[in-house]
Image (tube, rainbow, N blue to C red):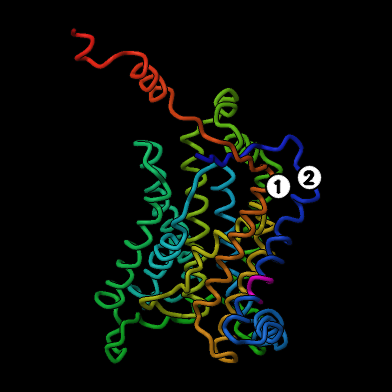
Amino acid sequence: MIRVELLRRDNPSRALRLLSPLIGLSLALITGAIMFSLMGKNPAAALYVYFIEPLTEAWSVHELLIKAAPLILMGAGLSICYLSNNWNIGAEGQFIMGALAGSIFPVLFTDFQNPMVLPLMFIFAVAGGALWAGIPALLKARFNTNEILVSLMLVYVAERILDYLVRGPWRNPGGMNFPESVRFHSYARVPEIMPWDGRANLGIVIAILVAIALWFMLSRTLKGFEVKVIGASPRAGRFAGFSSKGMIFFSFLVAGGCAGLAGIIEVAGASAQLRPIISPGYGFTAIIVAFLGRLNPLGAIAAGLILALTYLGGEAAQISLQISDKASRVFQGTLLLYILACDTLIHYRIRFSRKPAAKGIEQAAASSEQQPPAAERAV
């Protein structure tokens, strides 16, 4: 039997480690070109629609910034989780719960209209996302459950809660029976950056500031050092006096808070109301953002813009090239696959070896050959 082993390289190339995201992106572009060719589309024209056309008009740049804001926020937050070796896959659910918690004021207290509404919405959204992320953190710290499965399953619970509320208690009584909440009043809207030129709002500014703050925490504070040490070696972290359980809660709460903030920025900015679906999959795409950004919150800024561009490009390609939205999802998945593959091959080498037979089986076979059958031994 052939066994495949991954052996850590003693001195992985620093240049290749830095270039890994670019290599992965290049391979994804080549694969995308092949995919479009197989679909009967001109690869050059398709890639132009995906990556160049959305940047040629001012309104599309505004749309790019709107889509990039939640991706940057969640990608930066997830970077903290993954660096600490805690695998939060449920940012999508935390995004939804943050949006719901932050929408309490404009939906249930419509008469409460003053400048304090938006800051309170942000606070409630951060708390809602963090509390939802705290569930898998608590279960892992207390019962050693698998945080990947728990956080992922909670995504579907959050989706059902959102669907129930907008079709039931929170449905707009004057909305012609459509499943949506009331539209948010002006005090509950995220202000636009340049209202005379496009829809981009302060969400992108908030996202960049949060990413910078998380980068500063990682690179300049003891807590950031703790995140890196525990993620690299939990045993070394214990010797240093760091708490692994405390880090579980810290990383999940930070990531959940960022996701919750992203959720309220989305519904209080571009949407201005709650609907059954408020995210096109931002929480899952944010995983790609985190790894494309090298688990660095500053890298998440650039990665978020790139992945936002794939969303815009996918929408443009559906119109211009008459292709399914599944094509853009395939491209995003391919990008994550190549990035992880490049990182793996840069840090590890593959060795093929023949797996020996189990010792117990070999010994049993040898003893059976040496000893005569039971009937003969009896004679």
Magenta: predominant secondary structure element? Answer: helix
Give the farthest residue toward the right. Answer: 15
Which residue is disc 1 drawn over? 346
Picture quadrant where residue 341 is located: bottom right
Residue 327 versus residue 316 in the image, above or below: above
Is 246 situated left or right of 34 in this image?
Answer: left
Query: Callout 1: helix, strand or loop?
Result: helix
Quadrant (top left/top right/bottom left/bottom right) for the C terminus: top left
Is 155 situated left or right of 51 in this image?
Answer: left
Residue 175 versus residue 347 in the image, above or below: below
Asked if labels 1 and 2 touch by Cβ distance under 8 angstroms, the answer is: yes
Neighbourhood count class around disc 2 (C-alpha, 10 Å): few under 14, some 14–19, many 20 upward = few
Q: How many marks?
A: 2
Picture quadrant where residue 70 is located: bottom right
Q: Where in the figure is residue 318, as x and y percent of width and height?
A: 54, 87
Look at 37% across and 22% down and name the residue there. 365
Q: Where in the figure is residue 147, as x and y percent of width and height?
A: 41, 46
Look at 29% across and 92% down and name the residue there. 176
Look at 58% across and 74% down and name the residue there. 67
| 42 and 358: which is toward the camera | 358
Residue 312 in sight:
yes
Stretch in magenta: 29-33
User: What residue type is disc 1 on?
Assistant: Ile
Is 224 situated left or right of 184 in this image?
Answer: right
| 333 and 159: which is toward the camera | 333
| 236 and 192: which is toward the camera | 236
Mark pair 2, 1: CA separation = 7 Å
Instruction: Please check the rendered image and state whether residue 317 is part of the magenta-colored stretch, yes or no.
Output: no
Q: Where in the figure is residue 101, as x and y percent of width and height?
A: 39, 64
Q: Where in the figure is residue 235, as x and y percent of width and height?
A: 55, 27
Which residue is disc 2 drawn over? 13
| 181 and 143: which is toward the camera | 143
